Image: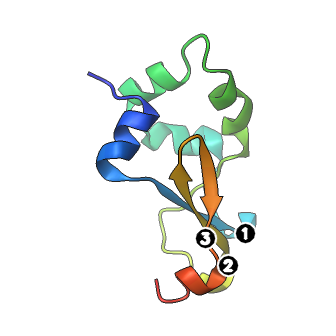
Amino acid sequence: MPMTFDQFESVAGAARILVDREACELDWSQLRKLIDPAFLRVALAPGQHWFRANCAKWYGSRKPIGREMWYGIEVWRSPCWRSLTRDAWQGV
């Protein structure tokens, strides 16, 4: 059974690394091919306005991206993403 984002986050936690677009070789059309189809069905279902409105802004990479390309790290703290200070992620 698919989980909601909040259910997933409560079990596994969620974070994202914001990077320079030039570091990513995959645009949304390529990235979506790597995502579980069951998740995509839920995420793109009617009523998922935020996901549909933002997915074209997402990029990815199959290769590690060096820290020099990082803009920041965000962690999910419901109801929104929160930025970590640079000092908090320098040792990551």
x and y percent of residue 22 in the render?
A: 73, 68
The tag on residue 84 is 3
Q: Position of residue 5 (x, y in %)?
A: 45, 35
Q: Quadrant of residue 21?
A: bottom right
Element assignment for label 2:
helix
Mark 1 vs 3: CB contact within 8 A: no
Going by the picture, which residue comes out furthest to the top?
46
**Quarter holding residue 30:** top right
Do labels 2 and 1 touch, CB within 8 Å? yes
What is the distance, in whole Å, between disc 2 and disc 1 at their CAs?
Answer: 5 Å
Q: CA distance from mark 1 to mark 3?
A: 17 Å
For the residue pair 7 and 69, the one nearer the viewer reads as 7
Which numbered disc covers residue 48? none
Q: Amino acid at mark 3?
A: Leu
Amino acid found under the numbered disc labelled 1: Asp
Residue at left offset 73%, top offset 45%:
57
Q: Mark on residue 20?
A: 1
Q: Which residue is mark 2?
A: 69
Q: Position of residue 9 (x, y in %)?
A: 40, 45
